[in-house]
Image (cartoon, grey):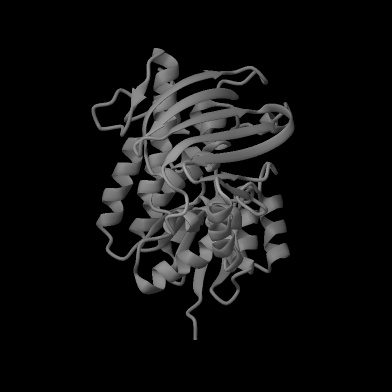
Amino acid sequence: MTRKLRVGVIGAGIAARHLAGFGWNKELFEVPVLCSLDEERGKALCEEYGIGEYTQDADALFARDDLDIIDISTPPSSHFELCRKGIESGKHVICEKPLFGSIAEVDEMGRIVDRYPGRKLMPIFQYRYGSGLQKLKLLIERGLAGKPFLTTIETHWWRGPDYYAVPWRGKWASELGGGLLGHAIHAHDMLNYVHGPCAEVFSYGATLVNPIEVEDTAALSVRMQNGSLATLSMTLGSRKEISRLRFCFNDLVAESIIEPYTMGRDPWTFVAGTEEHQARIDEVLAAYVPGEDGYTRQFELFHKAIVEDTDPPVTLQDARNSLELVTAAYFSQRTGQPTPMPIAADHPLYRSWLPAGEWCVAATV
């Protein structure tokens, strides 16, 4: 019989998506308790998903010995401390993006996790598991893509004043960053998922759409460690919302759908340079068996990692790669210079990319 893992959820916003993912894995997970300071939304989620207990005391979840996993779905500025408490209480931890507010915090969390053998921390990057992107990964693994040349990624969404009426949004101290950190980070993780780490970035960023502190528009040029190039654009001022990923290889062009929040899913297009190679690609794709995607698949893989004591499907290094791109982009915007990666401990933004004066404020939020 498959062992069910018991999850305590903290949060009542994006937590609803997590609860749906756990719900599709009823044989693997159960959620006996939800914690949220928003009583109305928290109790509504408890009723909707059949959660027996509601609390506003997060520390009570860490103290319990009947929970296997703490799921953190709170605003970004709280993530590090909640993750630390979760691991130190002997639990596994799932944490929403963006994971933390600095590369230093990612590295420190790695040291904390190392002190608790068997405890696993999994950042959220659920878009990886769409069938379209998984098909591209399969073609690369089969050697059918060839040398990578260029990737273009567009994250063009709309966020108006109502979105920023939520008090913690649009502020460096609580949201920790703008569209690069909170919106485009999923698509940019797909870049790293396909090609590996970035090597250098040049970035322009601006606040053009709303009167907020953080950026809502950006354009990046990236050199990857594998030698290919990428162009990344992000705006929260697109009245027609799209997300698009396009990968150019020597033997293949792969292009996503443009649905803004499901761009990893089918139907992707895969176009080869010759009829013979197209036939080889089509043969592999015809044998592909689609499964669950999104949170459902990521949680399923996390259960497997816990039971088999292997690495989680998304690791701290994966989160570090994505946050290095954000850090380097912010540094490039402020200096007007290309910024190399990886970001090491001697980098000026290693401990925080927040503007001067905001770092200490964020530590108290």
Image position of 127 with respect to 246: above or below:
below
Q: Position of residue 219 (x, y in %)?
A: 54, 23
Look at the image and tell me whether residue 184 can be seen: yes
Give the residue at x 59% y 69%. 289
Give left or right: position of 204 versus 263. Answer: left
Residue closer to the observer: 232 or 173: 232
Residue closer to the observer: 150 or 322: 150
Q: Position of residue 78 (x, y in %)?
A: 47, 42
The quarter of the displayed image where residue 16 is located: bottom right
Residue closer to the observer: 190 or 40: 190
The quarter of the displayed image where residue 217 is located: top right
Image position of 231 with respect to 192: above or below:
above
Give the residue at x 51% y 76%. 4
Q: How many marks?
A: 0
Give the residue at x 36% y 57%. 87
Give left or right: position of 344 versus 265. Answer: left
Q: Position of residue 191 (x, y in %)?
A: 48, 41
Q: Position of residue 52 (x, y in %)?
A: 64, 69
The quarter of the displayed image where residue 284 is located: bottom right
Image position of 26 with respect to 142: above or below:
below
Give the residue at x 58% y 40%. 245
Q: Residue furthest top?
A: 336
Give left or right: position of 35 versus 306. Answer: right
Look at the image and tell me whether residue 98 can be seen: no
